[in-house]
Image: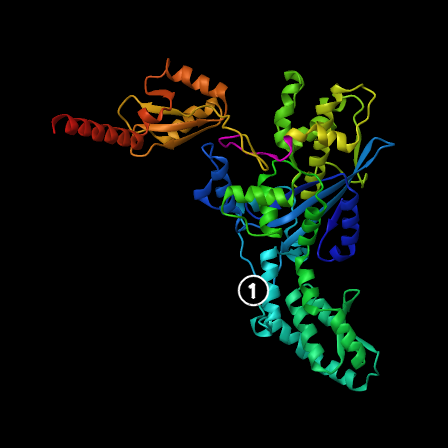
Amino acid sequence: MCEVNSRNFKFLYPEIKKKLQESKFCSIDAEFSALDPLPNKKASIFDTPSERYSKLNANLSAVVPLQVGLTAFSFDPKKNSYLGKVYTFYVQPASFQYIHRSFYMQTGTINFLRLYNFDFNKFAYDGIPFMNRDQELRLRDKMSTDEVSEINNSCKNALEEIIDRQINQVKNWYAEAPIGTTLVLPKVCTEGCSNEEIVFFVHKTFRSMCKNLWTYMENGEFVVKKVSPEEYSKLNSKYCLEDETIDNLLGFSKVFRLLVELKKPIVGHNVFQDLLLIVGNFETALPEKYLDFKKLISKLLPNIFDTKSISYELKPMLPKEKQWIDNGLNIIFNYFKNGFGRVLATNSPAIEMDDPQLEYDHFHNAGWDSFCTGYVFVRLAHLNIYQKYPSSKRFVPSELIAGLEQYKNRINIIRGSTSYINLDKADPESNRPPKLVIESLKNRPVNVAQVTALLSTYGFVEIKRLPYQKYRALIAIDNYANARRILTHFNTNDSEYRISKYHPLRHSAGIRVIFVSCLAVSSAAVLWFTFR
């Protein structure tokens, strides 16, 4: 597993590009700075796909990725073997005037990541910068109109200290130096190279300080070179400081753009939030409308597979005693790696990481999770298709992926009105049980917290007050079996509450008012025509 940061990103980028180009599919994962920072935008079983998108959009608008995992899977047909090249990227928002960002750091998320030994220093000190296209266009515009200035530099004092400390040395050297000679300024690199804004203005300051003085970075060191007027003109036209700076600030966004360009199948596990996060941070601000988001993501990444959604669909293929017990990534991975899934399907391909020395079980490291996601994807794809052919047959990646075509762009939704959404077609109708209504039989207002605790023994439930009604509340349940158990129990054994199926005309005060009003108007109209 290869750890990529701001120090080695430029060196590793050509290799990353080559691995992605050669891959049969790629799997992704991300660790966030926060998950649900807005208390009034909590997910609910009552959510339609559009409502869930709206809540996630609001929650994630000020959330950034701290770590991105990406695994490029290649295939060796002779060995019937997949090899995953795993990259773990530490990333952080680019810092430069006009594109500075504020974002949420949620204490619950920090504590969760700390449990899994997340290194926050690597995010803070070595994070690869990124920005989306909106930020890039804004910064290019400001640079083209010379609005980017030392005056607006957020590290103005640090910049002035670096210049003041080096200016006399550079001027004295320049006065005596022959054309073609260079001077290395190690202190500039040590104190400023990780700050693109400082480096940008150091380049600009020294280039304008002396005539035909060129500057560049080499082997991590800041170098000044005295050149001829002709060479300066060539260098200045060939190497644009503004373009180089923006390229550095784009950082990890270039990897995302490469994925968009290549259009490889992308695999994630429970990937909805990851998709919103990576599009919003690496491509463009998320659209307000859900349907516009679906169009955007289908254009950018048209071949997405969600292993959580697929696992729900394929699980019933197996006898109950042989099914995985939960659809969490770690559970399904261990099921196929070390459990019954190892011998479930004949002639399964081998799946290995490029680094066989790496220890397993690093869940919630984005790189490791991305590998596990790809591993599960291959196992599920093989399970889906192997029984339809002779046991000796080996499947190439295109056959396995084609076998899952019906699940492409079907993205899992955690406890919403539907269990998944379709990114490139209409969403399915709700497959949740009809909503129920709980009514107090003792003329006391329904206590939501008390009722939630009471019903929690029947599975996951959610209680919501009905407008203008103290003695009734709406109940949403995650599956039909639990709904039947609740209805049976409370209609036969309980003397305090009655629970029935929700009916808008009987249970909605608003609809009843409208109905009664319409009835009254109709009756009045009939009387008027009768007796006029």
Residue at the image position 41 percent from the left and 28 percent from the top: 452
Q: Is residue 23 left or right of residue 516?
A: right
Q: Could you say which quadrant of the image residue 190 lies in?
A: bottom right
Q: Nearer the viewer, residue 514 or 178?
A: 514
Q: Main secondary structure of the magenta part?
A: loop
What amino acid is labelled 1 in the image?
A: Tyr
User: Does residue 411 belong to the magenta stretch?
Assistant: yes
Outermost residue to the left = 531
The local crowd at label 1, few if under 14, some if 14 to 19, many if 20 or more residues have their Cα within 10 Å, is: some
Residue placed under numbered mark 1 in the picture: 98
Does residue 332 show up magenta in the picture? no
What span is colored magenta in the figure? 407-418
Above or below residue 324? Residue 28 is: below
Whether residue 425 is visible to the viewer of this picture, yes or no, is yes
Picture coordinates of residue 56 (x, y %)?
51, 43
Name above or below for residue 95 compared with residue 118. Answer: below
Farthest top residue?
492
Residue pictured at 69% horizontal, 35% vertical: 373
Image-quadrant location for residue 23? top right
- Residue 352 location in percent, x, y? 79, 35
Q: Quadrant of residue 269?
A: top right
**Residue reaching furthest to the bottom:** 175
Q: Position of residue 28 (x, y in %)?
A: 67, 42
Q: Position of residue 263 (x, y in %)?
A: 70, 43
